[in-house]
Amino acid sequence: MSARSSPYTSGPPPPRKHHVGAGSNPLRRRSDWFESWFQRFLMLILVVGVPLAAGGAGPAAYESTMRTVHAQTAQRHEVTARLTSGVAGDSGAARQPTQVRWTERNGIVMTGTTLVKPGTPEGTTVRIWVYRDGTITGPPATAATAWSNGCFVGGMAAIGMVIGVYAVRAGVGLVLDRRRFAQWDAEWDLVEPRWSARFRR
């Protein structure tokens, strides 16, 4: 028994569905085609540009910070100083300035002002960083600082790339939407008189 005369079939077989591709859609305009390919181009920029931006800005920031680390390390050195006066412990400040005295490598006695915790008694020894001329300063930057700075700059470069691409996409989409609206208005101005004339008969 053939499939046509089978008692389990009722009527002709259902027609096959034909999927219309996006490129062959009769309602697809040039602006739609351009927007589709432009979005693919932007995705390619994201895939390629984000790693390049992060991989370029991050190491550059790391190398720049490391040069600063080497320069500061060469200009500063750490010494042991002794407080020449005590610090009151009833202050609400986290650290208070006080006078200290230390001896340089060449035997010259130096004095200066540094910050210590409240309640530190006179004669306490503290470690401080000083320039070659004896001016008290902070500790130099470290390799960890350079690494974190490189990661931060690289991450910000990647985020900036993503924001820039999406901003371009939104701007182009806005321009295309305005153009479509203008085309629709112009086409409606041509079609509307014919359409409304059908109801005036």
Image (cartoon, rainbow, N blue to C red):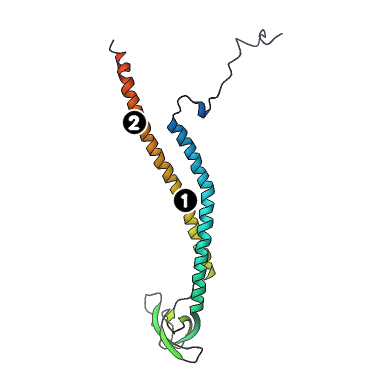
Give the percent coordinates (x, y) of residue 122.
Answer: 43, 87
Which kind of residue does numbered mark 1 sit on?
Met
- Identify the disc placed on residue 54: none
Total numbered labels: 2
Spatial separation of the CA atoms under disc 2 and disc 1? 32 Å
Residue 125 horizontal side relative to residue 96, left or right: right
Residue 107 horizontal side relative to residue 186, left or right: right
> What secondary structure is found at the residue carrying circle 2?
helix
Q: Considering only vertical position in the picture, is 17 above or below 175?
A: above
Determine the residue positioned at 45% across, 46% down: 165
Give the percent coordinates (x, y) of residue 42.
Answer: 48, 43
Front residue (pair 40, 200): 40
- Identify the disc placed on residue 182: 2
Q: Considering only vertical position in the picture, is 53 above or below 73?
A: above
Q: Residues within 10 Å of mark 1 (few under 14, many from 20)?
A: many
Q: Considering only vertical position in the picture, is 56 above or below 176?
A: below
Q: Considering only vertical position in the picture, is 30 above or below 15?
A: below
Name the residue tied to disc 1: 161
> What secondary structure is found at the residue carrying circle 1?
helix
